[in-house]
Image: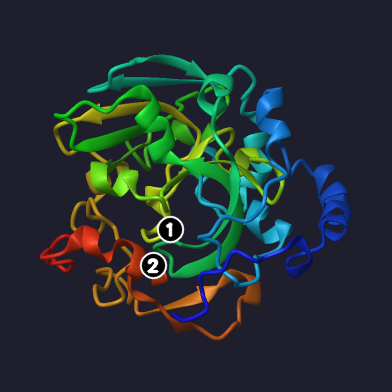
Amino acid sequence: MAGRWKNDLNWSDVTPKAAWLNRRQLMAGAGALALGGIAGPALAKLNAAPSQYSTAEKPDSWEVVTTYNNYYEFGTGKEDPARNAHTLTTEGWQVEIDGLVDKPGTYTMDDILKGTSLEERIYRFRCVEAWSMVVPWVGFELSDLLNRVGVQSGAKYVAFETALRPDEMPGVNSRVLDWPYVEGLRLDEAMNPLTILATGVYDEPMPNQNGAPIRLIVPWKYGFKSIKSIVRITLTDTQPATSWNKANASEYGFYSNVNPEVSHPRWSQASERVIGGGLFAKRKPTLMLNGYGPQVADLYSGMDLKKNF
């Protein structure tokens, strides 16, 4: 892992902005890049330097990041969200924060972003389909928001809920999952500095298909833990239900840490395919905790990660 964590990544080290902007303009006509409306303060802060946790690995292209997505509310195909998510209205977005907090309430995006320092973070983002990508997320630590609303002493978990809008989300008319989509973290996981709330990608507001206007990123867990388009955050003393665990508990545990030693019942998770390398790219070994062990392994000290999968 030596040399992985660097704070010196410049825009010249990644895809030139002019190049992906030109490609983006071509794609916009096909409706693949529907961006949600985010108020001025959010837009003003997107031009940020890489954080200390950014990986030196090259990010995937804008096209890959914004056209190969899991967002079942807009369809189960990887390309469905980019085609369908333009229907999501994000203007005036609000997030309810409740439960064991000192300042419960309904917060606007301006409220949430007030006082934060948005930083660009580049993470490898792996999902249960055994594919991975590197994304330059723009966001801030979840702990920043939780500290501002005041976590009460009895809180042990953080629960999240995605918007449920049948008129805007064609996928929720299917029964593939029990809607709305819900997720959860243990409080210490939520307070880890690698756990962020993202509001953008590259230096643009979050595209709808990527979870506009605000989503969770937990880089050492499989992608489905990183819930999109959040409308509710609840602090609780009870382990919350999570959508994929409710759908199939034998395949999807609460923790869902990247662990190559635990095979999914229907496939091995020991190796992964890098999306940016194409369909025929050589697979590479999956790293324990997605390579973020030095930062998060102590969260699971003494736990059996095969049992607590």
Tags 2 and 1 in contact by the CB under 8 Å rule?
yes
How does the figure colour the protein chain or chains?
Answer: rainbow
Q: Quadrant of the C terminus?
A: bottom left
Choose the circle earlier in sequence order: 2 or 1.
1
Check disc 2 and give the amino acid type: Tyr
Are there few (<14), some (14-19), or many (20+) residues within 10 Å of tag 2?
many
- Where is mark 2, residue-wise? 292
Q: Position of 62 compared to 2: left or right?
A: right
The residue indicated by pointer 1 is: 219
In the rendered view, tell whether residue 14 sits above or below residue 166. below
Quadrant into which the N terminus falls: bottom left
Whether 124 is drawn above or below 1: the answer is above
Q: Amino acid at mark 1?
A: Pro
- Numbered circle sitting on residue 241: none
Q: Nearer the viewer, residue 80 or 162?
A: 162
x, y percentage for residue 64?
67, 60
Q: Quadrant of residue 278?
A: bottom right
Q: Closest to the observer: 120 or 135?
A: 120
